[in-house]
Amino acid sequence: MSKSVRVVTYARVSTAEQVEKGTSLPDQRRRLAAAVTARAAVLVEHFDDAGVSGVLDSRPGLDRLLARVVAGGVDAVMATKIDRISRSAVGLLNLVEKLREHGCHVVLIDEGLDTSTPAGDLTSGVLGVIGGWERRRISERTQQGRRAAAQNEGRFVSSTPPFGYRVVSAPSQRGKRLVTDDAQAETIRAIFQRLVVDGCNATIVAAELNSADMKPARASSWSAASLRRWALREPPLRAASGTWVFDGIPVSIPAILTPAESAQWSAWQHGRTGPQQQSRGPYLLSGVLRMPCGRGAMGRTAGTQRPTYSCRDHYLPTADPHRHGSCLNVPVDVVDAAVLQHVRHVLAAPEVLEQAAKRYLRGPTQPAGEANALETQLLDLDQQITTEASALRAEGLSGRALGAALVPLHRQQQDIVRELRSLHRRAATTAHVRNDAQLAQLVATARQALSNNTVDTWRPLLSVLHALVTIDGYTTCNQCQGTGFLALGSGDGRRWPLRCPICLKGQTPDLTIELDNIIAFVIADRIRRMPSPK
């Protein structure tokens, strides 16, 4: 190294290394200063990082060093060992490349490495791989230490405690311990009593818990589905029975349930698991919901994922030109709730439908010629869509881009289908609304559905009303701002954000809900005139 070489030096230690190896910052600084003097170089500035892991590519001292190199006037960066700069091969090679862009090379005094030479450049890559290997060894040793602490000392070495417990510092020993959280323990006992012992419906139990402000660990309220999932899982019951498991190692913790209660809950789980997992449908809007492409939606539940309505062609391979990438999945519970709310609102306000109903009831239905004309338009439009799609594929469009280009034609198709359905409904309405026996049956069907939110009661009502629900497009979710996750509160202590409960991946569907206004009016008017049950 010539006398004119300008050098900046860098030192780093982590807290563990200061204790175990004695590689302190003053010691590294002294050795680096001696190396600069021995090479007759000029020390421009020294940088260091105290208690910062070498795994991180961005560190305060290292960032200042890079800024100094970019400013100019530096020929070499000197450190004692390769793991002082980086513990990963990728991190080291990226740093070497950044420095090389500014005419600067790396010197490691313990390894005798100088990247200004071809041999040193090759060696830096090899040593980077060794540094990565050493990092993996440290990770393995750390995991072994955590397992030993859990097994031998009963310490809590994970990040998130199980529901019903909180983490405290051990009074007489080092480390953390799990103790009972009184509020969450009371919630567990209430779930056990109402769901397992009393055999209540999960919807009722969830409502009772929410009314009593007994919240789950990572959400603002319980739903029937989330309560059933939680109660059927093995880890929550195992923890409430007095055993927490880390990496296969059981650790004793204070029990919330007695052994007899745990056995009763376990028997309930085994009796419920089979039917619960087999019950995936039917879906309320099967045959009623249309995707943006115009095709009927299918109900889909994959494993433990959230049930969705999906387009069958959405799951074709990405390279398949027939794949409907623009048809996004939508959550079943959100869409079902929107449809039920709309129907309830319509049947609660017959005056909204009165004018439309009177207009069609007092005169004949639309002539058949109008329906024939619409069917001809629909056939022509189908041919146009086929031709346009072939031309776009020939130009290289596929997937979501192809679907977006065809959206205007699909919208026209949906408008024609809606008008045809309206004409057919009008033609079929007279028989329903003028037959007292049939009308009484329709009213009974509606009243049963309005008092019970089950698929079995609502499916007949949607059929009577000739319901058609169409997804016209998607908008950014207002609650999560399109991220798909809720923002963390300032003091809730959660490590990971919760998934947004009203959307999938930040998108909510724009729905058009159509009903037979005439039948809806007659049913709503008859319900309104009926005496209230005493």
Image: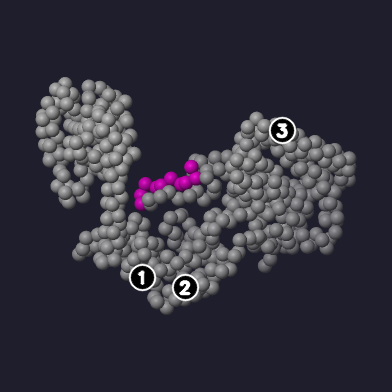
Q: Is residue 162 left or right of residue 529?
A: left
Q: Is residue 484 magenta?
A: yes
Q: Identify the residue under disc 3.
A: 388
Residue sitting nearer the eye, 332 or 311: 311
Per the model, the C-alpha gap separating discs 1 and 2 is 14 Å
Amino acid type of the residue tagged 2 in the rendering:
Ser
Per the model, the C-alpha gap separating discs 2 and 3 is 59 Å
Q: Earlier in the sequence, mark 2 or mark 3?
A: 2
Find residue 481 and report its horizontal and vertical position in percent: 49, 41
Marks 3 and 1: which is nearer the front?
3
Amino acid type of the residue tagged 1 in the rendering:
Gly
- Prevailing secondary structure of the magenta residues: loop
Q: Identify the residue under disc 1.
A: 242
Labels 2 & 3 near each other (Cβ < 8 A): no
Seen at 21% across and 63% down, the residue is: 173
Checking the image for residue 266, the label placed there is 2
Seen at 30% across and 55% down, the residue is: 140
Start-end of magenta stretch: 483-493
Q: Is residue 505 left or right of residue 258?
A: right
Element type where label 2 sits in the image: helix
Q: Earlier in the sequence, mark 3 or mark 1?
A: 1
